[in-house]
Image (cartoon, grey):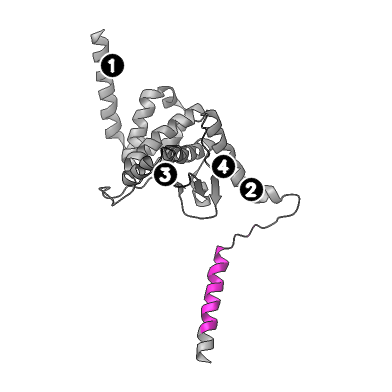
């Protein structure tokens, strides 16, 4: 009897655990099934496919949405699939921010088509390729008609800032490193976007405030470089 009760308890716990994983969509009928079930997927696929078409990306990059509430998106370097968790949607305020997340992960998948050596290199030096995907993602965004400032507003909301990022202690560079490199890239290559409406957002203002020293130092170096170039002329 005791063994039976223990077994019954284990079964009930397992049933409850499984029940928590079930995704229930309420208010569904034959007329609204696809809208109820696929509205997030439809948005993600439309933005993702626009990025790939407008950039003439000829490689296959399947895109999926999961019901995982963790704030995360990733590219599987082995099979080139891109996945975005539904928990991330809580932090996305516009199509441009969604475009950055997808463009970044698509850039990883495109890079992974470089063969086994590239696949191994990306795994061994993930920080380098994270920053490369940030910048390639910005290029993809601009070519698809999205505002690259969203890379900064989105990154400022979700990038981590570990105590250190040496070796294998953290697979991504510090958020501050990624943000300032993206800012520099936009400043030099796409300066017309530095006056976009997104620069008035709270997230961008917070980035400016927290990274003011780095921003000012970079701007001063750029000013000196321009003055030197003009002097050489």
Residue placed most toward the observer, 65 or 108: 108
Q: Nearer the viewer, mark 3 or mark 4?
A: 4
- Provide the residue designation for mark 4: 44
Which residue is at a point 35% across and 38% down the rendered structure image? 131
Of the residues under marks 2 and 3, which one precedes in the sequence? 2
* Residue 23 drawn in magenta: yes
Of the residues under marks 3 and 4, which one precedes in the sequence? 4
Q: Is residue 74 above or below residue 185?
A: below
Of the residues under marks 3 and 1, which one precedes in the sequence? 3
User: Does residue 155 appear to the left or right of 163 in the view shown?
Assistant: right
Of the residues under marks 1 and 2, which one precedes in the sequence? 2
Q: Is residue 51 above or below residue 191?
A: below
Report the span colored magenta: 7-25
**Mark linked to residue 31:** none
Confirm or deny contact between disc 3 and disc 4 (CB under 8 A).
Answer: no
Q: Residue furthest front?
A: 116
Q: Residue furthest top?
A: 233
- Provide the residue designation for mark 2: 38
Q: CA distance from mark 2 to mark 3?
A: 26 Å
Mark 4 is surrounded, within 10 Å at the Cα level, by few (under 14), some (14 to 19) or many (20 or more) other residues, namely many
**Could you say which quadrant of the image residue 192 lies in?**
top left
Circle 4: element type: helix
- In the picture, the quarter occupied by the C terminus is top left
- Provide the residue designation for mark 3: 157
């Amino acid at each position: 009897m005791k063994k039976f009760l223990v077994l019954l308890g284990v079964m009930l716990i397992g049933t409850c655990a499984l029940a928590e994983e079930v995704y229930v969509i309420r208010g569904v009928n034959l007329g609204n099934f696809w809208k109820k079930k696929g509205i997030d997927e439809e948005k993600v696929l439309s933005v993702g496919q626009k990025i790939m078409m407008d950039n003439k990306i000829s490689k296959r990059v399947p895109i999926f949405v999961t019901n995982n509430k963790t704030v995360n998106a990733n590219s599987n370097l082995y099979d080139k699939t891109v996945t975005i968790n539904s928990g991330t949607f809580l932090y996305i305020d516009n199509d441009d921010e969604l475009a950055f997340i997808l463009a970044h992960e698509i850039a990883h998948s495109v890079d992974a088509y470089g063969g086994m050596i590239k696949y191994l290199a990306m795994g061994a030096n993930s920080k380098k390729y994270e920053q490369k995907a940030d910048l390639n993602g910005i290029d993809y965004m601009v070519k698809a008609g999205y505002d690259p400032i969203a890379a900064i507003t989105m990154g400022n909301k979700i990038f981590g800032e570990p105590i250190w990022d040496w070796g294998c202690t953290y697979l991504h560079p510090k958020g501050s490193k990624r943000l300032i490199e993206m800012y520099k890239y936009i400043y030099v290559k796409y300066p017309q976007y530095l006056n976009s409406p997104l620069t008035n957002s709270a997230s961008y203002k917070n980035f400016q405030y927290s990274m003011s020293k780095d921003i000012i130092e970079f701007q001063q170096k750029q000013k000196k470089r321009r003055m030197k170039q003009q002097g050489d002329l």
